[in-house]
Image (spheres, rainbow, N blue to C red):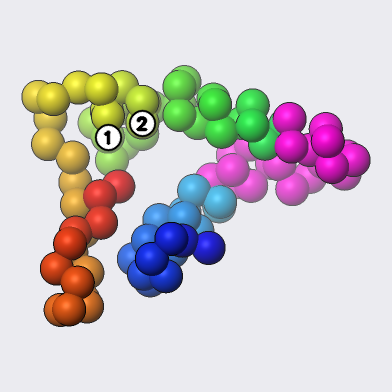
Amino acid sequence: MTQNSDPYENAVAERVNGILKQEFMIDAYHLELSLMKKLVAEVINKYNQIRPHWSNYMLTPNKMHLQSSIKMKTYKTKNRSNPKATSV
């Protein structure tokens, strides 16, 4: 679930969930909950710290957010009452 129930935010969240399942195969493990939480935390750390992203000009998400020379891509919402763009 996304914070604002915005379909565009949901699409980004679903994309990240898909990457975690497809590339890191977290859905293939059948572990007890405490171990699964540790596995997911480790995978998310790798996703943010190690894995470069094409949409971030081959920077990791953390490096992209720390830099200021490259403009981040944003996606406008269709909801005219909420003109705030959702950044990725």
Between 44 and 23, the one lying in front of the other is 44
Relative to 7, is 83 on the left or the right? left
If you read the primary sequence from the N terminus, does the residue marked by circle 1 or circle 2 appear first? 1
Give the residue type at disc 2: Pro
Depicted 38 relative to depicted 13: above or below? above
Residue 31, quarter of the rendered image: top right
Picture coordinates of residue 52, whole percent (x, y): 38, 27
Mark 1–mark 2 contact, CB under 8 Å? yes
Q: Residue at x 19, y 59 (%)?
A: 85
Q: Which residue is mark 2?
A: 61
Q: Residue at x 13, y 25 (%)?
A: 68
Distance between mark 1 and mark 2 Cα atoms: 7 Å
Q: Is residue 12 magenta?
A: no
Picture coordinates of residue 26, whole percent (x, y): 71, 41
Residue 11 visible? no
Picture coordinates of residue 39, whole percent (x, y): 72, 31
Q: Residue at x 40, y 56 (%)?
A: 12
Q: Residue at x 25, y 22 (%)?
A: 66
What secondary structure is found at the residue carrying circle 1? helix
Dot label at residue 56? 1
Relative to 50, is 29 on the left or the right? right
Residue 57, quarter of the rendered image: top left
